[in-house]
Amino acid sequence: MGYIWEPLRVYLMNRGIVPHLTPMNSKSIHPNQKIFCAGFDNGYGSVKLFVDGFDVIRIPSYISKEEMEDVPGRVVFNGNAYTVGESAFRTGYYFERNTDSNINKINNALITLLGALAHLPHRKAWHLKVVVSLHDVGLASDLCQVLNGEYKPLLAGKPSDVKVEVLKVVPEGMGALFGQQLPKKLTVLDFGNGTTLYSRYNLGKREVHTPYAFGVEVLIGEIAKKMKHLNGGKLGDLSKIRFCLEMGHTKYSRDIDIKDVYTTCLKEWYEGYLKKPVNLALDAKHQGDEIWAIGGGCLLPGFKKLLEKNDFQILANPVEANSSGLLQMAKTLNSATNVSMESLGV
């Protein structure tokens, strides 16, 4: 058994630097502290921001420009006002979603990061040292250009000086493996909102990383079409469908239960889209790999049982596992100031 990032872990242990794996109690944070390590997962379906010392912030990847009060997620920046997260959905009006366009994860990154910060207790200054995950690390320089800098937004109605320093951009899902005890051979499926990621590792080194452009959003889109007979002939609202599934049930509204439609669409989604990466993982299992599953899709009603039946190990807290690992990466990199991951064979 080994650890991913083994050379980095050994280097730090030899120097007495051990990554801090448990977040501090926020009450112990000095009011004048400015510098915080953080993990940022700007997903198609939800934003996960894990700032050291605070609870993880997980909010829908929605941005509204409707007029609102100074609610959590409210950001006033560069003459524009935005509401990020659940409150954007609660406006009941048009809002933009990360999943609406592949480039939104880049273009919206700063606004969603600030919106997530606007859910945390107010601080006059934040200097965030961040590790970020991205579906395509070829776009890492574009993402860094959007995020890096110093800003003066209003967060939930209060002024704050925010500095963002990106320490590293890594492929989506990789954070979930950081610090984990890994088998010699491992295959991981990450069931996200916009993509399904297939990755293989040998002795802690990634060999394959293939994104498939069909995540949970495809399932939700099919449900929206097939529930018209329950919804007065109208397409279902994508965000309302997503909301009820994330709550672990199929009650679309007080009057509409989409259980039968969901069951049909889940089978079709699996057969039409997921069967290929799942079969690849099962082939890898036949070759001696352990197979793990992460991502919010693992928790879809009924889907978790299907994965477990096929001997997938579902990581604890699969939705936030990636952001938690990203935070640990940030803390490790920040501690090892002069050490790069690449120079240590990571």
Image (cartoon, rainbow, N blue to C red):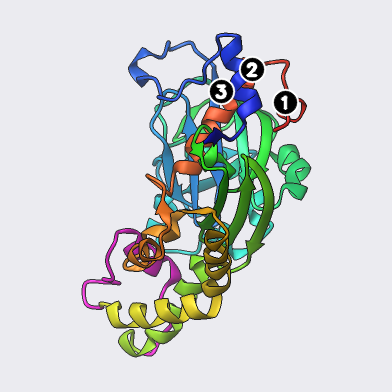
> Which numbered disc, 1 or 3, marks the residue that appears first in the sequence?
3
Residue at the spot 50% in from the left edge and 68% down from the top edge = 217
Which residue matches tag 2?
Answer: 11
Inspect the magenta stretch and tell me whether residue 237 lies in it.
yes
Q: Is residue 339 above or below residue 287?
A: above
Side (left or right) of 266 relative to 147: left
Inspect the magenta stretch and tell me whether residue 249 lies in it.
yes
Q: Amino acid at mark 3?
A: Lys
Q: Residue furthest left?
A: 254
Side (left or right) of 59 relative to 329: left
| Magenta region | 233-256
Question: Measured from the top left, where is residue 36 in percent x and y?
Answer: 53, 21
User: Could you tell me which quadrant the C terminus lies in?
Assistant: top right
Q: Which mark is residue 294?
A: none
10 and 110: which one is in front?
Answer: 10
Question: Measured from the top left, where is residue 20 in percent x and y?
Answer: 47, 20
Side (left or right) of 173 relative to 296: right
184 and 124: which one is in front?
Answer: 184
Magenta residues, dominant SS class: loop
> Which numbered disc, 2 or 3, marks the residue that appears first in the sequence?
2
Question: Measured from the top left, where is residue 319 in percent x and y?
Answer: 43, 49
Residue at the spot 38% in from the left edge and 87% down from the top edge = 228
Q: Is residue 272 above or below residue 329?
A: below
Q: Amino acid at mark 2?
A: Tyr
Q: Which mark is residue 344?
A: 1
Q: Secondary structure at mark 1?
A: helix
Mark pair 1, 3: CA separation: 16 Å
Q: Which mark is residue 331?
A: 3
CB of mark 2 within 8 Å of CB of mark 1?
A: yes
Mark pair 2, 3: CA separation: 14 Å
